[in-house]
Image: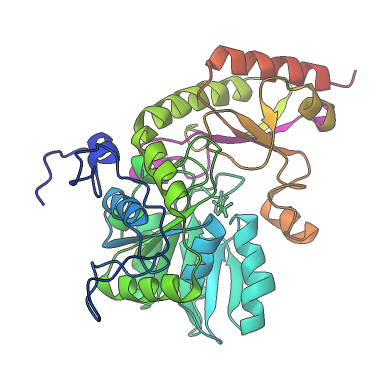
Amino acid sequence: MDKVYKEIESALIHGGIYGDKTTGSVNVPIYQTSTYEQLALGKNTGWEYSRTGNPTRAALEALIAELEKGVAGFAFGSGMAAITAVLSLFKSGDKIIISSNVYGGTFRVLDKVFKNFEIKYSIEDTTNLEKLEKSLSPDVKAILIESPANPLLTITDIAKVSELAKKHNILSIVDNTFMTPYLQQPITLGADIVIHSATKYLGGHSDLVAGLVVVNSDKLAEKLAFIQNATGGILGPFDSFLLIRGIKTLGVRMDRHVDNAEKLANYLLNHPLVKNVYYPGLASAQGYEVNKSQAKNGGAMISFELKENCNIKTFFSELKLIALAESLGGVESLVCHPATMTHASIPYEIRQKVGITDGLIRLSVGIENVNDLQNDLEQAISKSEEK
Ligand SMILES: *Cc1c(COP(=O)(O)O)cnc(C)c1O
């Protein structure tokens, strides 16, 4: 079908499978069904069983494939189910390289689940391409990166890593959760597979848990479709509908998220009680230029450390508007303590090595009024100072 729009703001609303031909409904109906009546023996409507395919899920899958400019999309019951499906492409003896700031759950599933199947992993600093290339032993079959990576917002050059992967005939996989296709499209930079925890910005309202995968070739699409149907970690019709609904407003939400984040990053940077600010949109940030070349802007996640004379327990308990919670990417601002929350499954020594200190605070900047957010941070930081 010919597309009558060019830009992503329109694709967010009209992309994938739009509306419903039977009734003219502008929204794809929620096909809350497990099975489909067959027309005759050996003759079906194209739908057989909802683990294999469901029209509401299919609309979402077509939408994310279009937004990420891939060949096919797949929807799962969580980001971790999506990651598990992608890791199921590999077999015993294979090794996956992950970047040193990867999501805690990605590390955990490799370290505690896939290790039992003799799929190996190693943690590398993917910002250092020379070192990365040296680590590519013959058993390495994929490089899995996040850029910005969780929680220090380190930037990896997606195009260069994808190029390196191609040169060695292995897969490049990008977890694009923190940027979304609105800000960054890894497949256009050369990546083979894009993963999302759609629980975060794509859903956008902290009201669902979902995962998405997009692949760049028919061959990978066929493999992923097989794995999705065989292992069964699919997203249900209602959550698929909610996710399509969330994605429609992704553009306007992200614009506001980023506006607020840029203001708060500058406020924190100039605060006398703040020691370090990590935000890829700051000119002083690691990888600022690389990020500028591959993403629209710095996104809306900020990490920071308070000075030694501040008590971070007091800081967390004094926040009134910003909630202390796991997760990110919702309309409401959330704050978390990576060392004891999102990254607690990573051993202490590894956390220290990669810079996830006990004083690190991660802020998911919401779309509230930025002055209200800044006032909340200001009163909590000032009360945390031990005089
Ligand atoms: C949250 C998150 C995941 C895991 O997704 P779930 O939906 O919680 O299973 C994976 N990667 C990143 C970067 C995340 O933030």
Q: Is residue 186 left or right of residue 22?
A: right
Q: Is residue 52 left or right of residue 146?
A: left
Q: Position of residue 57 (x, y in %)?
A: 37, 55
Q: Which residues are magenta?
A: 284-312
Q: Position of residue 197 (x, y in %)?
A: 50, 51
Q: How many marks?
A: 0
In which quadrant will I find the C terminus?
Answer: top right
Q: Position of residue 138 (x, y in %)?
A: 48, 85
For image coordinates 9% across by 48% down, the residue present is 2
Q: Is residue 304 highlighted in magenta?
A: yes
Q: Position of residue 212 (x, y in %)?
A: 43, 56
For image coordinates 36% across by 76% down, the residue present is 223
Q: Quadrant of residue 189?
A: bottom left
The residue lying toward the viewer, choosing from 10 and 242, is 242
Q: Is residue 103 left or right of residue 164?
A: right
Residue 131 shows up from this direction: no
Q: Is residue 368 above or below residue 81?
A: above
For image coordinates 63% across by 63% down, the residue present is 107
For image coordinates 55% across by 87% down, the residue present is 93
Q: Is residue 336 above or below residue 112?
A: above
Q: Is residue 255 above or below residue 151?
A: above
Residue 377 shows up from this direction: yes
